[in-house]
């Protein structure tokens, strides 16, 4: 069901490793050869093309360089492993018939590689509803000499357009708007957090009222000599059991109303 | 019909086998068991957030931080005042260096928030600390972050991880490269001893490494993987519902950490 994007960040090229085996031995999955697809949007339609096949039990590294010539510059490459053939062109994001597990979810390794080193996390990307929002508290900024900090907003929606949305960055304590940026839907947008004027003890809050995204926090030192990458949890993960999504709604309503006054 | 059959086949693996048990006390708070590492090559930091303040609760709040050695035995506890909606990077190595003697150079810790927001109580949920830990390796200018992943233990120090009726495999979907070194860390978040089998298997089937251990509740195990002859993957077999490891990946003086 999930797509596996190839990431993009300053000083780095993306690479994604796909796995055609189940993350556990007790949820039923298809144990055969699967098709590796590349999908992307040109802003009007989704385009999909077959990159190859992956035998059961095997893995495949796919680098941005491998797919660059197959799609427009700056499009987000989305990989998938499927049992079905995807339409070459479609108005709505292609539906994938692929292995799906819950504990844990089927994942790939999403990595960023500089001239010197690599950082990665285990992830996947499912489409967000277009009427959704983002609230993330970021304690990831690092302040050493020659360190740069970014938030990478990773979004996927069913419609093929690249919506341009406002991203606001606030200080949690004073609720002051520190900077305002834009991000694109169906893409990965790198936003520098160094020019927002945060100090070491400030807690940044990044919000978008118009779009949900996976917020990946990326730091690099000495132009890629050292890399760090991690995402924040969705607000529902601050609690367990009970009505977690009710808690998430309360938290979002509270912060969006608090921050509205200063926007 | 197909879906019904799938559900029936799955039932022996899910019925009565929750990933996270519910604490008995509805006002309990929960924490992951985070790994601390401290010696000449390692420093550990934790990004402390005032969770009650995030929910709009005013006043000053505190947390309790509790440390365990690598066998899961408690050796230190202290309370820390939170600074509201500010960033508070807790230098775990500094906290530990103030103690007379450390029982090991790695172990686990948990953080319990003392204030439960009313809005969370009303929705019958439990506040859980699954926040962000970072490691500095060999005084690198950048720390590597990983988020908490499990709701491991409640504030009565009862492990909350469920147990499986049958052995189950966790197949880490990660490519272990022959030219890199790894440390794979696993914590027993259940309340009973767990026998765990680790296998490093080549893509092409040959088993490179096979190891078997028994972990006590709250105990952490770190396995060094190096000198692999071919690209490989990890299989963990146990009666833990989700034996998800933390992976430290080394390449020269660079270290990258992530969860499975």
Image (cartoon, coloured by chain):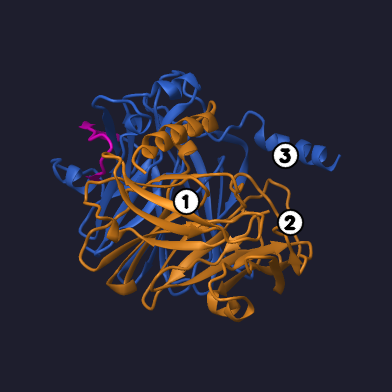
Chain colours: A orange, B blue
Observer able to see residue B184: no
Residue at horizontal 63 percent and vertical 50 percent from the top: A24
* For residue B166, side relative to residue A31 (left or right): left
3 or 2: mark nearer the eye: 2
Q: Secondary structure at mark 3?
A: helix
Reading the image, the residue beneath label 3 is: B10
Reading the image, the residue beneath label 2 is: A95
Res B119 quadrant in image: top left
Residue A259 at x, y percent in the picture: 37, 39
Residue at horizontal 41 percent and vertical 55 percent from the top: A230
Q: Quadrant of the N terminus of chain B?
A: top right
Residue B23 at x, y percent in the picture: 47, 23
Q: CA distance from mark 3 to mark 2?
A: 25 Å
Q: Is residue A251 depicted above or below A143 in this figure?
A: above
Q: Is residue A221 depicted above or below A231 in this figure?
A: below
Q: Main secondary structure of the magenta part?
A: strand
Q: Is residue A209 depicted above or below B260 in this figure?
A: above
Q: CA distance from mark 1 to mark 2?
A: 31 Å
Q: Nearer the viewer, residue B168 or B31?
A: B31
Q: Are marks 3 and 1 in contact (CB under 8 Å)?
A: no
Q: Chain of mark 2?
A: A
Residue at horizontal 67 percent and vertical 30 percent from the top: B15
Q: Residue extending furthest bottom?
A: A69
Q: CA distance from mark 3 to mark 1?
A: 24 Å
Reading the image, the residue beneath label 1 is: B245
> Is the residue at mark 3 from the same chain as the one at mark 2?
no
Q: Chain of mark 3?
A: B
Would residue B85 be counted in the magenta stretch? Answer: yes
Q: Nearer the viewer, residue A9 or B65?
A: A9
Q: Which residues are magenta?
A: B74-90
């Amino acid at each position: 069901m999930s797509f596996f994007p190839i990431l993009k960040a300053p000083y780095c090229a993306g690479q994604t490793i796909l796995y055609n085996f189940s993350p556990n031995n007790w949820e039923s999955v298809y144990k055969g050869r699967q098709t590796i697809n590349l999908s992307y949007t040109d802003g009007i339609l989704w385009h999909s093309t077959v990159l190859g096949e992956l035998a059961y039990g095997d893995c495949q590294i796919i680098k941005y360089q491998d797919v660059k010539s197959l799609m427009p510059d700056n499009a987000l490459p989305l990989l998938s492993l499927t049992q079905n053939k995807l339409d070459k062109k479609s108005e709505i994001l292609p539906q994938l018939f692929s292995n799906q597990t819950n504990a844990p979810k089927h994942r790939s390794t999403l990595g960023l590689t500089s001239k010197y080193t690599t950082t990665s996390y285990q992830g996947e990307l499912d489409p967000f509803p277009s009427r959704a929002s983002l609230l993330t508290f970021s304690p990831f900024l690092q302040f050493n000499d020659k360190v740069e900090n970014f938030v990478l907003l990773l979004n996927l929606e069913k419609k093929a357009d690249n919506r341009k949305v406002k991203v606001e960055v606030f200080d949690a304590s004073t609720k002051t708007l520190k900077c305002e940026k834009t991000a694109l839907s169906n893409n990965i947008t790198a936003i520098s957090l160094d020019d927002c004027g945060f100090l070491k003890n400030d807690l940044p809050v990044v919000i978008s009222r118009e779009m949900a995204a996976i917020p990946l926090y990326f730091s690099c030192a000495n132009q890629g000599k050292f890399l760090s990458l991690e995402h924040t949890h969705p607000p529902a993960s601050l609690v367990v059991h009970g009505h977690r999504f009710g808690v998430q709604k309360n938290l979002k309503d509270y912060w969006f109303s608090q921050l509205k006054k200063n926007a | 019909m197909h879906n019904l059959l799938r559900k029936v086949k799955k039932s022996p693996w899910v019925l009565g086998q929750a990933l996270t048990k519910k604490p008995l006390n509805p006002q309990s708070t929960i924490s992951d068991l985070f790994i601390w590492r401290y010696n000449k090559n390692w420093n550990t930091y934790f990004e402390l957030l005032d969770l009650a303040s995030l929910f709009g609760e005013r006043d000053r709040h505190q947390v309790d931080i509790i440390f365990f050695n690598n066998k899961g035995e408690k050796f230190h506890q202290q309370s820390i005042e939170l600074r509201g909606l500010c960033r508070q990077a807790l230098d775990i190595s500094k906290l530990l260096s103030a103690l007379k003697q450390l029982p090991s150079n790695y172990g686990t810790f948990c953080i319990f928030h003392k204030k439960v927001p009313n809005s969370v109580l009303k929705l019958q949920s439990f506040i859980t600390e699954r926040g962000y830990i970072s490691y500095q390796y060999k005084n690198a200018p950048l720390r590597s972050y990983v988020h908490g992943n499990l709701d491991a233990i409640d504030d009565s120090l009862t492990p909350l991880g469920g147990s499986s009726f049958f052995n189950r495999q966790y197949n880490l979907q990660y490519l272990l490269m022959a030219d890199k070194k790894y440390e794979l860390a696993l914590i027993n978040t259940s309340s009973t001893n767990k026998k765990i089998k680790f296998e490093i298997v080549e893509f092409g089937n040959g088993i490179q490494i096979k190891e078997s251990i028994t972990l006590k509740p709250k105990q952490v195990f770190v396995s060094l993987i190096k000198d692999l002859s071919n690209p490989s993957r990890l299989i963990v077999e146990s009666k833990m519902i989700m034996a998800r490891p933390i992976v430290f990946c080394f390449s020269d003086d660079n270290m990258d950490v992530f969860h499975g």
